[in-house]
Amino acid sequence: MNPDLQRLHPYPFERLSALLAGIEPPAGVPGIALHIGEPRHAAPALALDALWQHRDGYSKYPKTAGEPWFREAAAGWLCRRYGLATGELRASDGVLPVNGSREALFAFTQCVVARGLPGTAVRVAMPNPFYQIYEGSALLAGAEPLFLPELRERPGISDIAALDDRDWQGCQMLIVCSPGNPSGAVLELDDWADLFALADRHDLVIASDECYSELYPDESTPPLGVLGACRALGRAGFRRCVAFHSLSKRSSLPGLRSGLVSGDPALLRDFLLYRTYHGSAMPLPHQHASAAAWSDETHVIANRELYRRKFEAVLAELDGCLEVSQPAGGFYLWPRVHGDDTAFTRELLRSEGVSVLPGSFLGRDGPRGNPGAGRVRIALVGEFEESVEAARRIRRFVTTRWSTLRGTAGPASRRAAEPFC
């Protein structure tokens, strides 16, 4: 067996199952799951209709590169979304279909990392906290994860200046996530400029995970992605940059396993070669459903509004209870619990039947400790009423049992500087 398999860490949800083993919600209290980021809004009918209308495509082998009409639909969306000029991103060599961004991120790392370079360890840099696929893909590519510390004043944004040139030796790829998982933090143009300068100085490939790019609170200010940053900063041809997008969050289609990769044509050419052997072609009916979804914004705007209403109502319930605020993107809340996040998670389930994910499960220890410790991740993926009910239960737990367990005083405003209950 591949010895690198033994280097993999247990997945966060495997650790959560072990943590919660034997704990039951109170009798008669329905459980509410907020621990997993699985979108549960209704899928758009136009995508499901296209899937059904083209179901005969399951009788044919799909092309790894996808059909021209799929790539045109995907490139058209990217150009509209990021203000790219005609021809700046070509459907013929700037876009590939993938079976979800998770699969693509893992495969892309295997494709990019050059093993066995003499004289230095091979590294892949990534944020911390992070989506665990980043770490697993690096380990199975034979690389060492290089965990980047957070900026103290901007949780969720990596402090690349905290590392010196020696730290970057042997690093071949930098993974970024904006909006971030779990923080929801968004990279600004100056951040992208710093990342591009770093990539040029150390010959890094930038892999930008943007699966949450279409979930944001203000319709007038969508998050800036790597393609848009390249355009704004005059980085012709998206040199060394690849973006990963998904329909799972944007269009509430997690089961379709559909996404796209776009960016530097030279990198995509080699990635296509890898995928030809990898055997991950997208089925034709899925391409039709995906093209329909990428071509429509009405359902995406409606989807954002559903999340917007939930955030507003849930944050109102948690005001004065947890140190938490509206994220710049995504569908997670990332509150501080001012105590042991694993104990908080266990006791919340035991007391109120609500499951969340301990923040420490999403991070790794570094010089500054585990950046996820003392936080929990709350996924607002369910229906409105269920999400608000979960917030009420969390508030009741924090202001009664958690305060007692921690021996703290009463609640404070979430905008205040003093410790929260």
Image (spheres, rainbow, N blue to C red):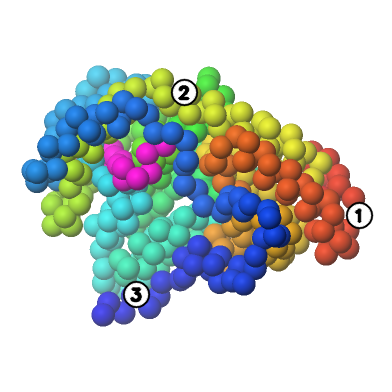
Q: CA distance from mark 1 to mark 3?
A: 47 Å
Mark yes or no: residue 21 visible: yes
**Residues drawn in magenta:** 252-266
Q: Position of residue 166 (x, y in %)?
A: 46, 64
Q: Would you call the spot at circle 1 few (<14 residues within 10 Å), some (14-19), or many (20 or more)? A: few
| Residue at the disc numbered 3 | 5
Q: Secondary structure at mark 1?
A: loop
- The residue located at (38%, 44%) in the rendering is 254
Residue beneath the point at 56% across and 37% down: 383
Mark 3 secondary-structure assignment: helix
Task: Report the disc number at residue 409.
Answer: 1
- Residue found at the far front of this picture: 28
Return the x and y of residue 175 as percentages of the image width and height. Answer: 41, 51
Q: Residue furthest right?
A: 409
Residue behind mark 2: 301
Instruction: Residue 172 in the image: state x and y as whole percent.
Output: 34, 58
User: Which label number is shown at residue 144?
Assistant: none
Image quarter where the N terminus lies is: bottom left
CA gap between label 3 and label 2 equals: 41 Å
Please give left or right for residue 334 compared with residue 290 in the image: right
Q: Tag 2 or tag 3, which sits nearer the N-term?
A: 3
Q: State yes or no: discs 1 and 3 in contact (Cβ < 8 Å).
A: no
Q: Which mark sits nearer the N-terminus, 1 or 2?
A: 2
